């Protein structure tokens, strides 16, 4: 094989790789905050999860975001959908104070293709850690909350390498099935897990609700032009 022929082959391979790479773009993640226990990111979503249909960037006041987070509750149990379980706040007061400004910042920076995602681990005992994760986005006049995991306990030794790194970078994926429902104690809910795009009561898919925003809480809403 002469030099000219070899050069043509390499050039062809290079062009094929370039075209293939352009045809299959990677979904990128932008970090808003990250430490050993928590992260808040902007995650590009595929069209499967309504990517390009979010009304971002969006500005929500910190006061309204904090009020929404304080009112979020999870009711767990097989019969929770009928109101027979015991409910718990999704975020403690300390967690609300921590996540509020980061969520507000994330929504201001997000594009119509990006969801604000979060991941947190706590350590209820020396042997276990508990994971809470999910995402938020704005569509129309509503803030949507996706809760994938709520204080799911796993053994720390299981999380040392592959397990922890895997779910930290997949905050919308459930670690295990959690029967129950997500609701807000005082805000008007206009969409819920039972008919939401992210899943249903009987599956491993995340809980999902949409809460209507007051007009004074949403400062710059304009209908998305990208559909």
Image: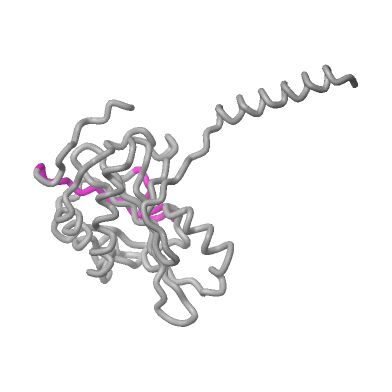
In the current view of this chain or complex, which residue is farthest to the bottom? Answer: 126
Q: Nearer the viewer, residue 191 or 202?
A: 191
Residue 17 sits in quarter = top right
Q: x and y percent of residue 103 in the render?
A: 28, 52
The residue that appears at 27% across and 50% down in the rendered structure is: 209
Quadrant housing the N terminus: top right
Whether residue 87 is visible, yes or no, is: no
Eyeballing the image, is 96 above or below 112?
Answer: below
Eyeballing the image, is 175 above or below 126?
Answer: above
Q: x and y percent of residue 69 in the render?
A: 22, 59
Q: Main secondary structure of the magenta part?
A: loop
Quadrant housing the C terminus: top left
Q: x and y percent of residue 211 in the render?
A: 20, 49
In the current view of this chain or complex, which residue is farthest to the left? Answer: 216
Q: Write down the region rendered in magenta.
A: 197-215
**Residue 214 magenta:** yes
Residue 48 sits in quarter = top left
Eyeballing the image, is 127 above or below 52?
Answer: below
**Residue 89 magenta:** no
């Amino acid at each position: 094989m002469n030099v000219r022929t070899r050069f043509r082959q390499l050039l062809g391979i290079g062009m094929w790789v370039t075209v293939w790479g352009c045809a299959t773009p990677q979904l990128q993640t932008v970090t808003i905050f990250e430490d050993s226990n928590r992260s808040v990111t902007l995650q590009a979503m595929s069209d499967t999860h309504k990517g390009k249909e979010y009304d971002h960037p969006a500005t929500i006041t910190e006061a309204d975001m904090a009020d929404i987070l304080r009112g979020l509750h999870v009711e767990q149990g097989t019969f929770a959908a009928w109101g027979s379980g015991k409910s718990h706040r999704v975020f403690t007061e300390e967690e609300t104070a921590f996540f509020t400004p980061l969520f507000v910042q994330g929504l201001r920076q997000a594009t119509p293709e990006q969801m604000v995602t979060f991941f947190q681990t706590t350590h209820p005992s020396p042997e276990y850690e508990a994971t809470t994760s999910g995402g938020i986005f704005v569509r129309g006049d509503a803030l949507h909350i996706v809760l994938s995991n709520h204080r799911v306990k796993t053994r720390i030794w299981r999380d040392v390498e592959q397990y922890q790194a895997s779910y930290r970078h997949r905050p919308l994926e459930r670690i295990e099935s959690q029967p129950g429902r997500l609701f807000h104690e005082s805000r008007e809910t206009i969409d819920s897990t039972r008919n939401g795009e992210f899943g249903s009561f009987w599956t491993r898919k995340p809980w999902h609700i949409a809460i209507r925003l007051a007009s004074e809480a949403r400062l710059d809403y304009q209908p998305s032009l990208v559909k």
